[in-house]
Amino acid sequence: MAREEALGHRLSDQGHHHRQARGEAFVNQSFLCTRRTALSLAGGLVVSLGAAAPSFAAAKIEHLVSPDGIEAWFVQDATVPLIAMEYSFAGGASQDPKDKPGVANLVGDLLDEGSGNLDSKTFHERLECRAIELSFNAGRDTFRGSLRMLRDNKDEAFDLLRMALTSPHFDTADVERIRSQVISGLRRRTTNPTALAGRKFLEMAFGDHPYGRQTSGTLESVPTITVADMKDYVGRVLARDRLKVAVVGDVDPATLGKLLDKTFGSLPAKANLTPVADVEAAAPPQRAFVPLDVPQTVITFGGPGVKRSDPNFMAAYVVNHILGGGGLSSRLYREVREKRGLAYSLFESLLWMEHSAVFIGSTGTRADRAGDTIDAIEKEVRRIAEEGPTQKELDEAKSYLKGSQMLALDTSSKLAQALLQYQQDKLPIDYIEKHNAIVDAVTLDDARQAAKRLWRQGLLTVAVGRAPQAAAQPLAAPATNSN
């Protein structure tokens, strides 16, 4: 089965999840490694779930509490006979032992490889014959899962999830097969410039903090992970008190409450998590060069960001859209691609975690144009930090971010993903209704202050590729901006 190597979506604000996914993708193996079980007919299920025609932007969101106290944000919708559930447990890969990064990732890869009274083959056959899509992924801060099914298959789907969470086998043959797949992927990444750039950026930004480690593990750590390590992780992290759930689809509240109790009710009452300290990403400016003989040089850049809980987050988000998050309309795209022809594409995003935040971007260019490309990016970053956006840019960005809300929530799956992320970000249950007013409230002064805060220090920059023709030396650090 194919193993997804993209980070997945962060959906805390309507209209941005596609850009956010792009922004996360180039540090994919370092922040999150996802394994999706989508067998045969389940591929059709993904299409069907994506085809729920009406937008859910105005959906009524209920705070459901099951008879045994399992809480969920829930939207009942009978437009199509489908149910989508997203859920997460706090902890994620930050709960990996310091000397064994990759435990959470292996757990996610193995939970559906046999559980209860079903071996791996039988478990997957049950998923396939009922067109059930079940997946797990280990994020930096959460261990997250998805369950999607036809309404008539809900009992079996929830029961298979219950078995995967509460009685995974971790049989030796399955563990070694999955371990070999993970190791093979890690070997491929040693020659992947995007993966190397993301890894180096995290090391620069976070050092020895858990955020600086590779979520999928290393070639040294993965072979040492034992079944005992994985069982210990499951016992400490998969617990009811750190569970968040979002469900959208054709099921009534009473039935859903019973399904939630049956699925999650036998998990431990309380998690036993290792505390993770808050951390500020390393201060710019810093540059690093990683030599690799590839046709195109990959450039990754970023720096300290704004946490989702920060009262100025929306101002930062709006001005970031202007700089690099707006695709073809962004300043960086115009300066680097349209005016200078230095790169085919360029993106930049805000990323936020439980204990830190960064802005981060990536592009690719010829080795002999890498220096010019970095200079162009830095020049535009300095300009917006010093001058801020124009009123026209602000108005256009706000209009886009408000209008894109409808597209961002046009399927049951997207809405479930968004509702789960709202919970993780500690947003109110009526956030969808408030979103546009929050965007509208951002003033030009707010945006200028946010730009200065984000970009006045400059950039952390990593270049991976062939050395420039002049000299095979690391890129020199620029002078510190005193503004």
Image: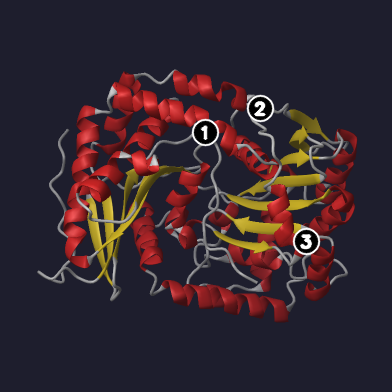
Q: Does 329 sit left or right of 96 as displayed? A: left
Crowding at mark 3 (Cα within 10 Å: few <14, some 14-19, many 20+): many
Per the rendering, the mark at residue 404 is: 1
Residue 240 image position (x, y, % from top left): 75, 45
Depth check, front residue: 458 or 392: 392
Between marks 1 and 3, how big is the CA–CA gap?
36 Å
Q: Residue at x 38, y 74 (%)?
A: 191
Residue 247 image position (x, y, % from top left): 75, 40
Per the rendering, the mark at residue 164 is: 3
Which quadrant holds the C terminus? top left
Assess whether mark 3 and mark 1 are in contact (beta carbons under 8 angstroms). Answer: no
Mark 2 vs mark 1: which is more N-terminal?
Answer: 1
Q: Which residue is mark 2?
A: 429
**Residue type of the residue flagged with mark 2:** Ile
Per the image, label 1 sits on a secondary structure element best described as: loop
Residue 409 image position (x, y, % from top left): 62, 37
Assess whether mark 1 and mark 2 are in contact (beta carbons under 8 angstroms). Answer: no
Crowding at mark 1 (Cα within 10 Å: few <14, some 14-19, many 20+): some
Instruction: Look at the picture and state if 122 lies above or below 354.
Output: below
Any part of residue 185 in sight: yes
Residue 195 image position (x, y, % from top left): 41, 65
Q: Does 154 sit left or right of 360 as displayed? A: right
Crowding at mark 2 (Cα within 10 Å: few <14, some 14-19, many 20+): some
Depth check, front residue: 479 or 25: 25
Per the image, label 3 sits on a secondary structure element best described as: helix
**Residue type of the residue flagged with mark 3:** Ala
Between marks 2 and 1, how big is the CA–CA gap?
20 Å
